[in-house]
Image (cartoon, grey):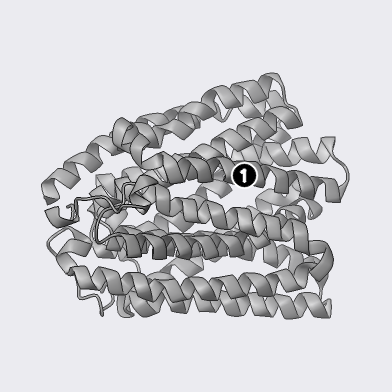
Amino acid sequence: MEAPAAASRRVPVLGRVADVREGEAAAVLWAFAYFFFLLAGYYLLRPIREEMGIRGGVEKLHWVFSATFVVMLAAVPIYSAVVARVPRARAIPWVYRFFLLNLVAFFLLVRAGVAPAWVARVFFVWVSVYNLFVTSAFWSLMADVFSSGEGKRLFGFVAAGGSAGALAGSAAVAWLAAHVGIANLLLLSAATLEVAVRCVGRLVAWGAERGPAAAAGLGRAPRPDAGTGGSALAGITAIFRSPYLLGVAVQMLLFAIGSTFLYFQQARIVAHAIPDSADRARLFAAVDLGVNVAALATQALATGRIVGALGVGPALALVPALSIPGFAALALLPTVWTLGVLQAVRRAAHFALERPTREVLFTVVSREDKYKAKSFIDTFVYRGGDVVSGWLHAGLAGLGFSLAALSLSAIPFTAASVGVALWLGRRQRRLEEAAR
């Protein structure tokens, strides 16, 4: 449900970049800053994680992904229990500051040189869990304070804050790593997380000022100073009761399978083609830089307009549609250059279009589902896709599948994802119309 007619006029300056209307500018800028600092902190950690993954052995990556899945299995009910009982203005900061304390602990362990091999493995798993949880919590709050129509117009620009932060984090690693060391980068990441926490309160206050009905757009919303209620497992049961949420979960699972297949192909191709550890880290950083530059330009200037023109379904289907010829090209020419182009195009389209569009799907569900079901899908289902894909990839490789055959085996999953995305787009439109 859109804001009142008084808010239909564009903001004079910000409205030239995105379709930001009166009454929305402050919230959009706080959301932009929130995502900027959140992803700046993550991208300080990402190159370190990627190198540790290869250093630990490509043939053992599926075990690491399995360990991440097990951690998710324990973490998701705990998170759901927190948001059920604690107001969102406190629940999200609590979660973020818990991870902040973890970063301080890793800083102390790295500085002291305690069990470096085991710390590296634990760190890889921890970053994989951390990234999904903090990002899921961010988008849950966005889907809570913005309506469906606002999300279609504004989520692209909000996502641009994350891409700008990712650029800042990647640049900081390139410039500072040799001078301050990895341990101090962990502390810098903790500092950016604390800044993100400060933005949460501003957004919650803005949503509360609009009133529960405007914030939720569903006519039934809990008080903003209360938790969502319900049980810790309510998010899981909601998915199996709702064909719509189940469709979102299936789409996430298929996306994760395609992404993990590509990740494993990346590890094999890069490990074979580039033996030097420092050169591999520089390659990963360069790909991150290119992806985030392309995503930032698209998000800030075009995402809202593209989603408005195409609709939710086609926008959601773009990444798997592009991936089908991409995997075919990688099968024909399994080189670092082919891999780099596919990764850059797929990830840029994901961040610029598919991810903001997917978050619009959650603007038409209840607040409890926005935090619990969404968290389960974003974390457990996503990492479940990693596990399925990791073991499938390892099994096919063990049977003697070539790099080309492994790339081709990912195409059926991406093709199925196109169909699910188009169905979700139609279903989202019907739910949005019913809520008006």
> Which residue is at the front of the view, 399 or 346?
346
- 272 is higher (above) or lower (below) than 56: above
Tally the marks: 1
Mark 1 — residue?
390
Q: As drawn, which residue projects farthest toward the top?
A: 332
Which image quadrant for residue 309? Answer: top left
Instruction: State whether residue 201 appears in this view.
Output: yes
- Amino acid tagged 1: Gly
Which image quadrant for residue 215? Answer: bottom left
Which residue is depicted at the point 66% across and 79% down? 104
- 70 is higher (above) or lower (below) than 151: below
> Which residue is at the front of the view, 404 or 198?
198
Which residue is depicted at the point 37% across and 76% down? 201
Instruction: State whether residue 48 appears in this view.
Output: no
Image coordinates for residue 300, horizontal then vertical, percent: 45, 46
Q: Residues within 10 Å of mark 1 (few under 14, many from 20)?
A: many
- 306 is higher (above) or lower (below) than 363: above
**At numbered mark 1, what does the secondary structure look like: helix, strand or loop?**
helix
Q: Is residue 233 left or right of residue 52?
A: left
- 368 is higher (above) or lower (below) than 4: below
Q: Is residue 217 left or right of residue 187?
A: left
> Which residue is at the front of the view, 172 or 134?
172
Image coordinates for residue 362, horizontal then vertical, percent: 30, 53
Which residue is depicted at the point 28% across and 63% down? 145
Image coordinates for residue 2, horizontal then vertical, percent: 18, 52
> Which residue is at the front of the view, 374 or 216?
216
